[in-house]
Amino acid sequence: MENLRVLELYSGIGGMHYALTESGVTAKVVAAVDVNTTANEIYKHNFPNTPLLPKTIEGMTLDDFNKLAFDMILMSPPCQPFTRIGLQGDISDPRTKSFLYILDLLPRLIKLPRFILLENVKGFEMSSARDSLVKTLKECGYNYQELMVSPTCLGMPNSRLRYFMIAKAPPGSFSFHTTSEIQEGFPQPADKVLLEPSSPISPSPTSTAYQEEDHKEDEGGILYKLERAQDAERKSTQNRDQSLRQISVYLEDQGEGEMEQYLLPTKTLLRYALLMDIVRPTCRRSVCFTKGYGHYVEGTGSVLQSCMETDMEAAFKSPERLSDEEKLNQLSRLKLRYFSPREIANLMGFPKHFTVPKNISTKQQYRVLGNSLNVHVVARLIELLVS
Ligand code: SAH
């Protein structure tokens, strides 16, 4: 295939660009667009030769877009309007404006891009923004497939269930059977489906990922930690799943002293120990890292127990009967620490050569990484889109 010209919108730290490279598709990012100065600094540091436009998407005219003559759009519009935790402002949220602007421009471009890939949070599939996207793609004649994929599908011990739309301009068609349903996990190649019509559908790792992030509403018994029995059960099932790699594969090979900076502060330990999602290097799971990681504790990502000699249950034993000092004593024996930004980048599939300028703080790194995506997942989707 000839060199595809790619437009990377909402480029952030370049997760899409890394995925494009990993996919092996011969392509060139002709422009990346983002307004976030920290993210842009990191992007430029890693892709010094890619034209990066530090401006708003709505600030670009139809003519600007036409001049770029792109064949593919890779984009991750802001997800806050669609998260279950957010206010779910959907299309009335000002942060959706730029996306609606793109949808408005698309049919008016001189040349329709042959390929479109969009990434967003779980929740986007129920939004009016999604309905507008589907409507626009249909009007322009695109063939498309919506999917919900988590990196656990690729054996990675991290949940990051995301919505994806992949679309091909007419007359393009996919190498698998498309459906109007949202596909869970990666689609099987069409020939495989035809060869094994009667094979039972085995539960895919994605379906576990679904349950995993959807467990919040139901009630259940509370264990020694503030955790319900079914959550503990689900976690131990995942930890036994040999199709997932161990967390240890993704950890930094640093002396213990180096990692000391990531130890949880005393105040956090006392306040939040019972709410944190704790994993060990031998575990095969971790929860999605979001932008508040290292700052807010609850629901922003797992923390790592770095001392294996201490038993977790012993450390959490009857905390209500202990003084703060005794509690701290017990908990600090676990040496609970945050994953470093590099480790999170590893769990999100960023290559070793991805680096961050020295002046970017740890907190800023957590923020931009939390907004980014799993590179391996997107690379597979780009392959599917282009093949
Ligand atoms: N895929 C990216 C992250 C996308 S997060 C990555 O791999 O890092 C959404 C990004 O959209 C943020 O970086 C934010 O700065 C940017 N953004 C939000 N609204 C924008 C707008 N109107 N114009 C340009 N960029 C915008």
Image: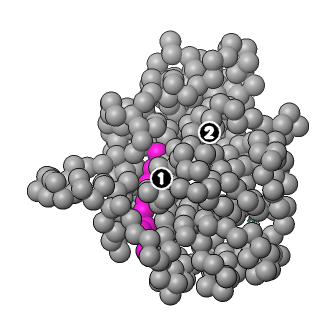
- The residue labelled by disc 2 is 350
Find out whether residue 284 is within the magenta segment.
no
Residue 132 seen anywhere in this rendered image of the structure: yes
Residue 6: give its label: none
Compared across the picture, whether 104 is left or right of 219 comes to right
- The residue labelled by disc 1 is 383
Identify which residue is drawn at 33% across, 30% down. Answer: 242
Residue 276 seen anywhere in this rendered image of the structure: no
Identify which residue is drawn at 51% across, 23% down. Answer: 248
Whereabouts is ligand 1, in terms of quadrant? bottom right
Among the two numbered marks 2 and 1 on one chain, the one whose residue lies closer to the N terminus: 2
Identify which residue is drawn at 69% across, 26% down. Answer: 263
Identify which residue is drawn at 75% across, 25% down. Answer: 261
Q: Residues within 10 Å of mark 1 (few under 14, many from 20)?
A: some
Question: In which quadrant of the rendered view does residue 145 lie?
Answer: bottom left
Find out whether residue 144 is within the magenta segment.
yes
The reply to whether callout 2 and callout 1 are in contact (CB within 8 Å) is: no
Q: Nearer the viewer, mark 2 or mark 1?
A: 1
Quadrant occupied by the C terminus: bottom left
- In this view, the residue in front, 305 or 8, is 8
Percent x, y of residue 246: 45, 27
Compared across the picture, whether 210 is left or right of 158 comes to left
- Is most of the magenta stretch helix, strand or loop? strand
Percent x, y of residue 16: 63, 53
Percent x, y of residue 72: 60, 65
- In this view, the residue in front, 3 or 336, is 3
| Extreme-right residue of the structure | 359
Task: Give, as a three-letter code, the residue at label 2.
Answer: Phe
Residue range corresponding to the magenta coloring: 143-151
Task: Give, as a three-letter code, the residue at label 1.
Answer: Glu
